[in-house]
Amino acid sequence: MDKFVIRGGNPLTGTVRISGAKNAALPAMAAALLTEEPVILENIPQVRDIETERKLLVAMGADVELGYGRAQHRTTICCRNLVNAEASYELVKTMRASTLVLGPLVARMGHARVSLPGGCAIGARPIDLHIKGLEQLGAVIAQEHGYIEAQAERLKGAHILFEKITVTGTEDLLMAATLAEGETVLENCAREPEVVDLASLLNKMGARIEGAGTPTIRVQGVERLRGARHRIVPDRIEAGTFIIAAALTGGDLSVSSCEPRHLDALLQKLEECGVQVSATGDSVRVSGNGRPKGADVATQEYPGFPTDMQAQYMALATQAEGTSVVTENIFENRFMHAQELVRMGADIRIEGHRAVVRGRTALSGAAVQASDLRASASLVLAALVAEGETIIDRVYHIDRGYERIEEKLRGVGAQIRRIGELLPKRMVAPEVAV
Ligand code: UD1
């Protein structure tokens, strides 16, 4: 297993380019299941979750073509000759978002067999709302041998109110509704930019969707969808991670090819912390003096402060003046990074779903272990300001969602190297997939 070795102390300076959003690319790839024609996706990040999704689609008989050279972030998916409608436990257990194929498969094929994802490091994460919504659209669903089996002649439009806001749940049902008969109204929807990006792709494919980005989405079902070409939105979580890295190290960094509007909650919070941020066009410039002020934060659904930035923010809070209270409202067990940060010298007390972080503690390099994707990012950030060397184990978690993070960090002045297995340049190479 790979490890990162990081020597702290260097402020990050220069320009770093942000990749396409993993969380937008995954539903976009699943959307290709809705049509027989090719779907061309650009700005696909080269991360391990994308490789898992490629495997999932290939196992169903899809033709997935990866671009090379300058087109290396382009993927063409053609689902004309699907041989089965199954997502196996082997793949679903490595990536919960695999359940995004459920809605499109039932809608296009009339049936689907998708493994239940099981537990997760950050919380229970059930998919009951996906299932309930599909049932409301007329699917008959059974659970057997750890799999969800769904059947439907043709889905029928329905009025669906999500009891709780769910991102992939909204996406799953949105995709299913595009091919349902009649109108579907989805209420209490997730408003994340990734949902809006998916709706924009689906509309290019001939779907009739209105209201994505608001709590109510209306879908007029169509008989069939066609192929399309679509560019994936920039990854706001990758951008946010680099922005915090600059603030934390007292650097002067331009984060380019991002969408500053999607970062509003984070940028506002950083301004409250006294970090200088300015957004122009598709770039954010961050100048930190390395001595931020503490500020409380509470995670919320978009446009609130993202749960996917909570761990990284906690790393910043360890270096901020005063005490910051970090409240996690989305997942029940998302403080796994806290204990590892404490091992590096942080002063963090967990009280239920709140973490009380006393700031400006000197961090010192240590051997630490990544537990999930964003938790690993927070350890990388802490290591960038720790005295001495930090060794982070299990960096496969970070490879799930960050494209060559060590190369990007080195490019802006960090001292970081990967040790362990020698990885090929291209993360999507089949031999390195989990
Ligand atoms: C997505 C993101 C993930 C992010 C999360 C919250 C992708 C691929 N992943 O995950 O990075 O952290 O949104 O912004 O886009 N819930 C239920 N029943 C359901 C579905 C969800 O109770 O059927 C609960 C979850 O347990 C959680 C909350 O709803 O407490 C929000 O989860 P959800 O928005 O569904 O997260 P994901 O879509 O899995």
Image (cartoon, helix red, strand yellow):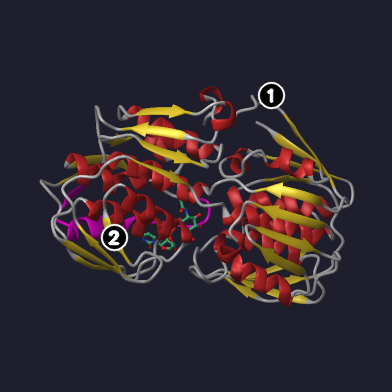
For the residues marked 1 and 2, what is the alpha-carbon distance in whole angstroms? Answer: 45 Å
Residue 141 included in the magenta stretch of the image: yes
Question: Residue 285's x, y, as percent?
Answer: 74, 61
Mark earlier in primary sequence (1, 2): 2
User: Which mark is nearer the camera, 1 or 2?
Assistant: 2
Question: Decide: marks 1, 2 in contact (CB < 8 A)?
Answer: no
Question: Is disc 1 surrounded by few (<14), some (14 to 19) or many (20+) residues within 10 Å?
Answer: few
Q: State the residue position of label 2.
A: 209
Query: What's the residue type where badge 1 is placed?
Result: Leu
Report helix, strand or loop for mark 1: loop
Q: Quadrant of residue 47?
A: top right
Q: Is residue 227 left or right of residue 235?
A: left
Q: Is residue 430 left or right of residue 29?
A: right
Q: State the residue position of label 1.
A: 422
Q: Residue at x 65, y 46 (%)?
A: 370
Report helix, strand or loop for mark 2: strand
Which of the numbered marks, if any, corresponds to residue 101? none
Q: Name above or below for residue 48 compared with residue 126.
A: above
